Image: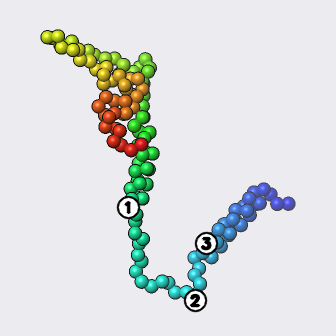
Amino acid sequence: MVSMKSGAGLAAAMGAVVLLGAGSAQAATPSGQSPAAGPASLAKTDVGQALNGTTTGLGYGVAPLKSLRLDPWANSSADVLNNGATIQPDQGLAPVGTGTLTGPLSAGGGVKDLPLVGGLSGVLPG
């Protein structure tokens, strides 16, 4: 009677023999052929297709980064950006506060939602 351990070992050994036999068969070259002589040459690259593929791939890589949530505690009670400070200057000037800059972040926005950087992120593909 053959145990399961020896059956598994036998199957593993047979698999190794098959793999090693296939590898040595691929490595062998026919004796009647000689290698091609002369320098190797590269095919010409189509620059338009290369740039199109690069910008398409870059767009798929950059698009999630533009909408990535920058403040991990946004819309929570632990959000430190939710606190704002406002200053009322003298001579009747309009008040200046930090809510304009931190508001989009504390609402859970990404780079595209920031006041100044959001417009510049439109230049990136995606």
The label on residue 32 is 2
Residue lying at the far right of the rendered structure = 1
Of residues 35 and 46, the one drawn nearer to the viewer in this rendering: 46
Number of disc labels? 3
Q: Quadrant of residue 90?
A: top left
Of residues 48 and 124, the one drawn nearer to the viewer in this rendering: 48
Name the residue rendered at 38%, 23% in the picture: 106
Q: Which secondary structure lies at badge 2?
A: loop
Marks 2 and 1: which is nearer the front?
Answer: 1
Determine the CA span between mark 2 and mark 1.
41 Å
Q: How many residues crowd around disc 1 within 10 Å: few (fewer than 14), some, or many (20 or more)?
A: few
Q: Name the kind of residue labelled 3 in the image.
A: Gly
The location of residue 26, given as percent across then percent down, is 60, 75
Name the residue that disc number 1 marks: 47
Residue 29 appears in the picture as rendered: yes
Is 85 situated above or below 124?
A: above
- Horizontally, residue 11 falls left or right of residue 53, namely right
Q: Name the kind of residue labelled 1 in the image.
A: Val
The quadrant the C terminus occupies is: top left
Is 36 situated above or below 46?
A: below
Residue lying at the far bottom of the rendered structure = 32
Name the residue rendered at 62%, 76% in the picture: 25
Name the residue that disc number 3 marks: 23
Determine the CA span between mark 3 and mark 1.
38 Å
